Structure formats: structure tokens, C-alpha cells
Amino acid sequence: MKCEIIAIGSELLTPWRQDTNSLYLTERLNQIGVNVTFKTIVGDRRKDLASAIRTALGRADIVITMGGLGPTGDDLTREAWADALGTKLKRNADLVGQLYARAAQRRWTLTENNLKQADVLEGAEVLENPNGSAPGQWLDTVYAGHRKLGVLLPGPAREIKPMFDEQCVARLRSVLPTRFIATRTLKAAMIGESLCDSRIAPIYTQYPDIETTILAGAGDIQITLMCRHSSIEAAQARVDELASRIEEELDDIVYSSQNEPLEQIVLYYLEMRGVTLSVAESCTGGLLAQRLTSISGSSRSFVGGAIVYSNELKTEFAEVPEELIEERGAVSREVAIALADGIRRRCRSTYGVGITGVAGPMGGTEEKPVGLVYIAVSDGAQTEVVEKNFFGDREYIRTYATQQALDMVRRKLM
Amino acid sequence: MKCEIIAIGSELLTPWRQDTNSLYLTERLNQIGVNVTFKTIVGDRRKDLASAIRTALGRADIVITMGGLGPTGDDLTREAWADALGTKLKRNADLVGQLYARAAQRRWTLTENNLKQADVLEGAEVLENPNGSAPGQWLDTVYAGHRKLGVLLPGPAREIKPMFDEQCVARLRSVLPTRFIATRTLKAAMIGESLCDSRIAPIYTQYPDIETTILAGAGDIQITLMCRHSSIEAAQARVDELASRIEEELDDIVYSSQNEPLEQIVLYYLEMRGVTLSVAESCTGGLLAQRLTSISGSSRSFVGGAIVYSNELKTEFAEVPEELIEERGAVSREVAIALADGIRRRCRSTYGVGITGVAGPMGGTEEKPVGLVYIAVSDGAQTEVVEKNFFGDREYIRTYATQQALDMVRRKLM
């Protein structure tokens, strides 16, 4: 089965934005044996949109559009599908009722524009959207003598993902031939991409039936293994075998074999050991805390901490002696240690993390250049500290520093 | 003039990779007045590729392909162009000579495969590639009775960019009518997309020569205006006029007319007024501080603050009375006020922000459901507080809450 994904929105044809949601859909589609053979990006013009849908229906079995289901004048996906299929839209009374109820709940005034979100293609089923006002649509139809599946999804990622997972995957499975794809994603921290590849290539090249992909982020490596087979057990056995051999080779550099983010792994360990963590962040300015608290349930092990951007706050919240900052400078090994130990005491947590550095692009000196970051972890008895020189922009340096901190906590807990 | 960009390569249809080179080309094309109306991503199958090129020739004046010009078996772009145009490839003797010279220089053995890089479409000009072995091609032809320009570029960014800038831009300019594009991007906070559109649609629809795009995020609206004209001054005057009228209508809801993020605007205001800010974050867990510190130079006005995830830390770092938390609960109007005021005092900043709420998906009760967030801003003399019920997932609720906080600070400073 061939699938074409059409991402809709004039903003996706500017130099500043690009479709990323199709990556998620592609992953899900691959898992149920569907190949994406074309992706098209088209603006909010009804004529262009209808032409793109017509072209897609001519060359793919499944056509998924993303976007253009909102209430504004440039949301024209429903109309364009009707044009492409030569069919009509009908206003759905249930959906109109839901729109009124939703607006009332939020104390919004419903405009005439809003109501077009209740227009449904003839013969289409409604896909409910608990995360937004625009419902999706599912169409099983015949176009130019061939059976075609059409899926109208909204544009925002947080609406697309649950709608596709909960309402489209099962519908697709019921019409697809049984084909199974097993995947495994290993994640590794603080190792370079080419070093990682040179260590594992001799292993994964022995598995030509498995597609191995290596992707690198800031201090983060993702190794994805994918195997297609007529039985899920056989496919799973193959990827599991290769995953084990890679884990053996990389040893404790691998922090997850199920694609969890590093912050989640750290929270697992903390909870398992019944211990707690606090952080004092200077150059990362809350990014580490933000990563930890992005995980639901993090309050069980993460108590909080301080953003100690100014020197005064380093003293106020993490008890760093003023003289130490004066003597060694705010960006120093000693201040990182004092931050980690001080925040741990103040927060009465088992572990404390301290980060201080130069995130750039301004503020670097010859002695303390942009990218220089000290990261310390204290458990009361002892404090470990590392000095790092990260290369990249502000965001990259900050992300890398939090990655290093999380990995140090993980290693302490292992 | 309409342009379609086709990115070629099966890896661009996996969940892990995507075309980014088209963003660069789009920027360059816009600068010379060319609109990108479609982008297509297609794999390395000759039939699919030829069909994509044919479709593009049918709906665009300029068709640019990227990739598939290398020496391997799955490099089929030349052949697909020939299929689409019903024309032939001719081996170019000069190019064959260059390939041999290049191989000799690098002590490579030239295989028969390598030589297909010397195949040129009938009537095409060769675009030299000093950064790789695969030359590009430039085609000025007639397809189905219309003049079409075809450009065959290689795949790697470092080959595409110089080839396009040095050999294609001047060629395009010479056949294009002189046209310029001016853009403006307005940003607005804490207004619904449809309410925003219903207020400004009566204005922007009076400017049919300007393409208006509205994009919505969590509490954030981006309005992009784009105008093409034969003079850059005229184009700029048109978008500036419309921008002024939209600003007038939306008044202080617009926080930026130059596409800056809200956190940057807040930092501008703080610095302009010579005042400082601190934050005490519970449910947003550092996200607000992270947004502020993502801007270089933020340390001039943002001093820091605390992540007060646990009740103890609310007392420890922001002086929230224990009794108050017991009486009113951690998620309450009173605690938000106490957080804002307490963190301001502790950090000795001009303003303090306090945020407490239920980010979910767990932890909601009937009385205090997921999405309930209190946000307070204190200036010492008085504290403003709002209660919000945000709908969405954890990330959305947290982002929305920080957006509300930033907007409240902005309004205080206006």
C-alpha cells in the first residue's frame, strides 16, 4: 500500500517553517507496513490544494492531508477535497452542537467562521478531536475506478498525534494486508556520532535485513533498528538480537533501549532508589529543571531548585560564598561545586546539581570562552565536577550542558 | 512566476530525515520575486520521479529538482527528466573528460556508472559543480505549449548552495520580470485564532495584493503579510500600511511587529525601563526561566528565581507561609500571589512572577482540574493574579501558562 502525505499551509512554503508532522505519521505508517512514497507541501489556495489532492489520489492508495481544518478564511482543506472528488460538504448537526458546547465551556463567542468546522464530506466519517476544535475526517471511497482511503487531519502536532494513533491506525489495519515491522531504538549519551558508528558498524552490517539509522543531537545518539517480516515474532527477534549485541558493545553508554529521553531514565532511577534531586542552574537558566518537569510524575523525585543567573542569587539560594565568586569567578569549577552542594542542602534533597558556564554568543573571554561549562553533582559526601568546552550556538551549548548533567546523575545512580 | 521544488531521495521519506535544502532555495527565490507554490518529496524510483516532474511541469513555471545526480544505481533524476519530457540524454564529451581528470587527480578508478554523470538532457546547459562530481543542468524549454524552466541540482547542501547562487540566480533574473517581495510579521498574545481573524479579516481582505497568513501556537498568534511588486519600495509601503491598520485594530494585543518572540519583547521593555524580573515556578518547572534565558543578554534584566515544585521549597525560596498552603492548597490564587511577591522580595527584583497549577495529565481533581493555573505578577505595591483553565496536553498547558505570565509582565511595563 502506497501512501502520500500532503502538508497544507502557506507558511510551510516560506523559508521559515517546514512540515515536521509527516515524520511522526511516517513512523506510524511504517509500523503497520505502509510506505510513504510521496510527500507534497502546498499552500492555502483552494485550486492548488484540490490539484494536489487529485494528483495524490492518482498515484497513492492512501492520501493523508494535514492542516487547513481550522475556522479561518484560509482553512480550505474540506472544500478542496470536495472539489477533487467532485462531491459536496454537508453541515453536521452533531458537530455544530459540539462547537457550541465547546465555545460555551470556554466562554468564547462562536462566529459564523467557526461553524464551517462542522462541514463533512459526503460519505466521510468524523474523527473526533478532543485536543482542538477542528474534527478530522475518514473517507473510504472509489476514485477513477480504484479504492482510495482519504484522511483529513488537523495541523497542530498535539491534535494530529492522538487522532492518528487512536482513530486511524486501527481503521488502517483493518484494510491492510498483514505485514509486520519491528523496531527498537537505543539511546546513548555523551559519545560522538562517528566514534559510535565505528564501534557498532562491524556488528549491524552483519544484519542486512535490518535497516539501521544513526542520528545525533547535542550529546545524544539515537540508533534505530527496523525489520520487516511476515511474522511479528520473527521481526522482533531479529531487532532484539541486534539491539543486545549493540548494547553489549557500547555498554553503559546506552541509557535507554526503549527510546525514552534521558530525563525520564534519570527520574526512573531516582524513584527506584527512593532518592531526590535538586538543581542550581546558571547558564542553562531553567532548561534542566524544565526537561525534568516535562515528564509527568517528576514531582515524586525532583523537588525543584533555583535559577541563579545573578551572583547575588548564587549566594542567596545556593549558599555560594561571595568571596568564592570574587576569587574564582562565577564560571569556575569551585562555584559549580558550591552550587551543587549548596542547593542540595537548601532543598534537603539526596543529590544536587550545579551548572555554571558561558552560553554565548556574547560574554566569552580568552580565559573563559563561549562554550566553557562546569557541571557538578553532589551527594553530600562527595561532589563530582567536570569541565566541558562545547561548540555550537547558545541553544546547543545549553542543551549539551543539561545532557551532561543528566548523564552524570544517571551514572551516580547506576 | 510559480516554482515547484522536488527533493529526491528515499531517505527523505523515512521518519528520521527530511529535506531542509528547500528552505534555502525558497529564501533565494523569494528574494528575486519567485513564489514557491509546491514542494514534493519523492524517492529514488524512476517512475515516481518522472511522474512528479510531469506533475510539476503542469502546474509551475520553474521546476527545480534536488538530488539523484550521483553515480549510483539509484541516481535516476536525469533519466526521469528525459522520461517526463519525452526527450533523450546525450553523453557530453567535455564532461567525460572532466570526470576522468577528477578521478585521476584523486586516484580513483572510474566505473561505467560514474560516466552517466556526463549525460545531459537535449537542449540543456551544464551547471558546473566545483564542490562535487555531479554537474547540474539548466533547461529552458517548452512543455505542453508553455515555456518552462527546469533546473537539476545535486543533493548535498554544500553543492546546492554555491551552484544555485553563482549559476542559477543570474540566469533566473534574466528571464524574470523584475519583481520584489516585501514581508512583515506581526505577533499577538493571548487571543484566539478565530477571534483574531474575525477582527482583522475585514481589513486584510481589502488588500488582495497581499498574502496574509495566520498561524496559532499556545497563546501566540503570528500574522505574516507578503506583497509582490515591481519596486521594493512599493511592496514595502503596502505591507507597512496593512501592518499599521492591523496593529490599530488589535491595539495592545500585538506585541511585536518584527517577528520577535514574546520573551524578547519582555526583556526589551525591562531593559528600557531599567527594571528587573524574577520568577517562582511550580507547574511550569523552569520553562518560563528557560524561555527568558534562551535570549542572549537576558542577564541584564532577568536575575533568576526558583523552581518550587515541592511545598517546602515554596516556603524556603519564596517565603510562602506554610499555613497558607495548608489552608488554600498549593494550587490557589493566594499561593500564586504569595509566590510572586515572595520571590520578588527574595531576589530583590522590581517584578516577581508566581505560577502554580495542575499541568497534568495526572494530579487533577474535580475541584482543581488539569489545566487550572494561577499566574501572578507583583511589583511590590500590588499583585495582579489571573485564574486560567487551559485545555491541552502537559506541554501545551505549561507553554500557555508561561505565555500568559510573559504577557502580564509586558502589559505592566507598557
Image (cartoon, coloured by chain):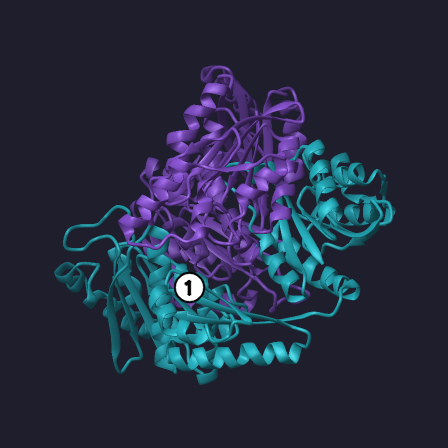
Chain colours: A cyan, B purple
Quadrant assignment for the C terminus of chain A: bottom left
Residue at the spot 62% in from the left edge and 44% down from the top edge:
A40
Neighbourhood count class around disc 1 (C-alpha, 10 Å): few under 14, some 14–19, many 20 upward:
many
In the image, taking residue B221 as reference, residue A143 lies left or right, namely right
Q: Is residue B310 visible?
A: no
Front residue (pair B304, A56): A56
Front residue (pair B249, B51): B51
Quick one: SS at disc 1? helix
Q: Relative to residue B254, is residue B205 depicted above or below?
A: above
Residue B168 picture location, percent across and down: 43, 29
Q: Quadrant of residue A391?
A: bottom left
Q: How many marks?
A: 1
Q: Circle 1 sits on which residue?
A: A289
Front residue (pair A258, A376): A258
Q: Relative to residue A312, is residue A343 depicted above or below?
A: below
Front residue (pair B69, A364): B69
Q: Residue furthest left?
A: A327
Residue B39 picture location, percent across and down: 58, 40
Residue A397 picture location, percent across and down: 33, 56
Residue at the spot 76% in from the left edge and 64% down from the top edge:
A176
Residue A97 picture location, percent across and down: 83, 48
Quadrant assignment for the N terminus of chain A: bottom right
Q: Quadrant of residue A72?
A: top right
Q: Relative to residue B125, is residue A95 depicted above or below?
A: below
Residue at the spot 50% in from the left edge and 24% down from the top edge:
B33
Chain label for disc 1: A
Q: Is residue B248 visible?
A: yes
In the image, taking residue A138 as reference, residue A321 lies left or right, namely left
Disc 1 residue type?
Ala
In the image, taking residue A33 as reference, residue B330 lies left or right, namely left
